[in-house]
Amino acid sequence: MVPFPYADEYPINRALPEEGALRSDVLAELEDLARREDRTWETGQCSGTMYCGDHDHYDFLNQAFSYFSHVNTLQRDMCPSATKFEAEIIAMTLDLLGADSRSATPAGLVTSGGSASIAHAVLAYREAAAGSVGRANMIKPETAHPAFDKAGHLFGVEMRVAPVDPATAQVDLDWVRDHVDANTVALVGSACNYGYGTIDPITELGEIALDRGVGLHVDGCLGGFILPFGRELGYVDAPFDLSVPGVTSMSADTHKYGYALKGTSVLCFADRALRNSQYFYQPDWSGGKYCSPGMDGSRSGGLLAATWAAMVHLGRSGYRDYARHIFETAAAMQRAVLEHDQLRIIGSPSFLFSFTSDDFDIYHVNDFLRTRGWRLNGQQYPNALHMAVTRPQTQPGVLERWRADLADAVDYAVAHADDPAQSGAIYGGVAGGPTSESDDIIRFFMADMMDQQQSIPD
Ligand SMILES: *Cc1c(COP(=O)(O)O)cnc(C)c1O
C-alpha cells in the first residue's frame, strides 16, 4: 500500500468530527493540497487529463458552476434555465458534429462523462432492438475504450473485439463484416481512440452498418471537440462524424477538449427514437410519477451551467485557436520523436500520438523521462508510450524540453537496453501475453485506491 496521503501533515478523519472545523481552516487545507497537486501538470509535462490548463478559465467555470451547484436538474419547474442550458449544449454539439445534414430528428443527452455516454449508447442500442434479437452483441475494434466492455458487462451486451493491425492501429474490416450476426445491434468506431490517437475507417464501418442494418456508434469522447477544428485547419481529412452515412450515434466529452468541468459529456443520436429507447419512466410509484432521461437521478445544475458557459464563451474561434496550437505542438513533438531512428510512431495519429521502439523496451524511455518530470501514458501489446497533447504543452519552452529530454532518454534506453525497464513492470505488457501476476497488479492498484480507509494510521 502507498502511505496514506498527507498523513503527517493534516489531521485524519476516522469519523465525523464532533465539532466542525472552521471554514477558513477547511479552505486553507483544500487550497494547499490543490496548489501543490496542480504543480504536477502546470509544467506542461503531463499527457492528457488537464485539457485547458488555464486557471483563469477554471475560475470562470467555477463561478458559473457556483450559481447552480445546489440545484437539482430533476426539478425543472424550479430551474427552467437547466432546460435552456441542456438544450443549447446538445444543439451546439449536434451542429458541430454534423447532425443536421442527415437526420430530421437528431437528439442528445448530457451525461456525467465519456464512460457514461458510451454506457447510455450501449443501453439504447440494446433497448431499441429488444424483442427482435436474442442476447444483443456489439463489435468494437480492440483499440476502442474499455468503457464499451464495461457497458457490455453492466447491461449484458456481448462485446465482440475485432483485431487491429499493429502497425497502423486500423481495425480489420473483414473481421467486423464476418462477425455481424442476427443479434448484432451496433458497431463501434473511434475518432480518435485513446491509445493511438488514430481514427477508425468510419466511412467503411458506416457502409457495413447500413448494409447489415445495424447501428454505428462513433466514440468521439476524446476527439469530438477538437477534430472538427482540426479538420477546418487541415490537420484531419478522414470523415468521422454524424454526417457519415451509417453513423447513428456519437459521444463527445465536454470535460476533455470541450474545456468544461469534469463530469460532463454529450451523447448525440442521429435519430431521437434511439435515445428515447433508453428513457426510464415509472408512472405508478407510490412516491409519485418518476422519469429520468438517463442513469443518473439528481444531477447538479452547476455542471450544465459550467459546460454551457465554456461553450458559449470560447465559441468556434476559441476552440479553433486552441486546436491550432495543440495540433501544431503535437506535430512538432512527433517530429522530435522521428528524429530518432530507434523510435517509431504507431499509425497516423493526430493530436495524440503513440510511439514504441523495435530496438529496446520503450519503458526505458519512460523511466528516464519520469526523472525529468514527464508523465506519459503507458501502453501494452506492444509496449508503447502515448502523449495526448493538451493546452499545457503549448506553453513556451515545453517543446524544447521535450526534444532535449527525449534525446537523453533515448541515450539512456540504448545504454540500458539489456536491463529490465522499471516502469514497464507496472504499466507494460508481459512478453507472451497476460499472466495471473499481471492480473494481480491491476487488483492491487484498485485496492490501493479504494481501501485506504482500512489503513488509516492511528
Ligand atoms: C476518456 C475516453 C473515454 C471515457 O471517458 P471518461 O470520461 O473517462 O469516462 C472513452 N473513449 C475515449 C476515446 C476516451 O478518450
Image (cartoon, rainbow, N blue to C red):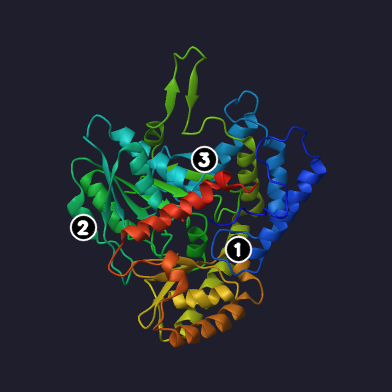
Three-letter code for the amino acid on which mark 3 is drawn: Val
Q: Which residue is mark 2?
A: 175
Mark 3, Cα crowd under 10 Å, few <14 / some 14-19 / many 20+, is many
Q: Nearer the viewer, mark 3 or mark 1?
A: 3
Q: Which residue appears at 67% of the width and 37% of the height?
A: 69
- Of the pair 393 and 9, the residue shown nearer to us: 9
Q: Is 409 left or right of 150, judged from the image as shown?
A: right
Q: Which residue appears at 40% of the width and 75% of the height?
A: 356
Q: Which residue is mark 3?
A: 110
Q: Is residue 199 visible?
A: yes
Q: Which numbered disc, 3 or 2, marks the residue that appears first in the sequence?
A: 3
Q: Which residue appears at 71% of the width and 40% of the height?
A: 66
Residue 259 vertical position relative to residue 378 in the rendered view, above or below: above
Helix, strand or loop for disc 1: helix
Three-letter code for the amino acid on which mark 2 is drawn: Trp
Three-letter code for the amino acid on which mark 1 is drawn: Tyr
Q: What x and y, as percent, mark residue 187?
A: 30, 49
Q: Is 51 left or right of 381, judged from the image as shown?
A: right
Helix, strand or loop for disc 3: strand
In terms of image quadrants, where is residue 144? bottom left
Q: Nearer the viewer, mark 1 or mark 2?
A: 2
Image mark for residue 126: none
Q: What x and y, as percent, mark residue 340?
A: 45, 85
- Of the pair 285 and 359, the residue shown nearer to us: 359
Q: Which residue is mark 1?
A: 322
